[in-house]
Image (tube, rainbow, N blue to C red):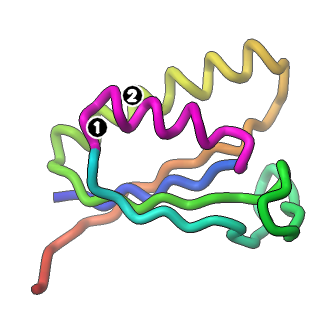
Amino acid sequence: MKMLLIVFRQSMVEHIHALLKEYDVTAYTELHNVAGRGETGPNVQFLLSPGSNCMILTAVSEQLAYRLIDGFTRLKADQKMRQDENMLPLHVFVLPCEQAI
């Protein structure tokens, strides 16, 4: 089992939800107004502002995790072409996951 940690701008939430639905991911935890600073710069920390970040955590099978990563890679490439941005605020991290309880 793998835990995907998906960090993205609030403005991308509909695209992220659509991708999760496409891969039949129905169980996840979603956090809004996540503050931080990374390679795309600092995010604005006002509640539900377009510059604020969201984070989704989802535990999935290893096979599904890598299929989702391919989907997120395609989404990021598609969004970069549309917006002509150097750094799109979408990051996906894979962590080992073991259910304890």
Above or below, 86 relative to 98: above
Name the image quarter holding the C terminus: bottom left
Horizontal and vertical percent for residue 6? 50, 53
Query: Residue 85 location, x and y as percent?
Result: 84, 27
Image location of residue 96, percent across then percent down: 25, 66
- Is 18 included in the stretch rendered in magenta? yes
CB atoms of marks 1 and 2 within 8 Å: yes
Up the image or down, 2 lies above or below 75; here it is: below
Q: Which residues are magenta?
A: 10-25
Q: Residue at x 61, y 28 (%)?
A: 76
At x 85%, y 56%, the residue is 49
Residue 86 vs residue 28, the one in the foreground: 28
For image coordinates 74% across by 36% down, the residue present is 88
Tell me, yes or no, whether the highlighted magenta stretch contains residue 8: no
Q: Quadrant of residue 3?
A: bottom left
Say left or right for 43 vs 63.
right
Q: Is residue 84 left or right of residue 101?
A: right
Q: Determine whether the residue tagged by mark 1 lies in a helix, strand or loop.
A: helix
SS majority, magenta:
helix
Q: Amino acid at mark 1?
A: Tyr
Quadrant holding the N terminus: bottom left
| Mark 1, residue position | 66
Give x and y (percent) for residue 16. 52, 38
- Where on the picture, by quarter, is residue 48? bottom right
Q: Is residue 2 left or right of residue 5?
A: left
The alpha-carbon separation of the residues under discs 1 and 2 comes to 6 Å
What residue did someone put label 2 on? 70
* Residue shown at 24% from the left, 35% from the top: 24
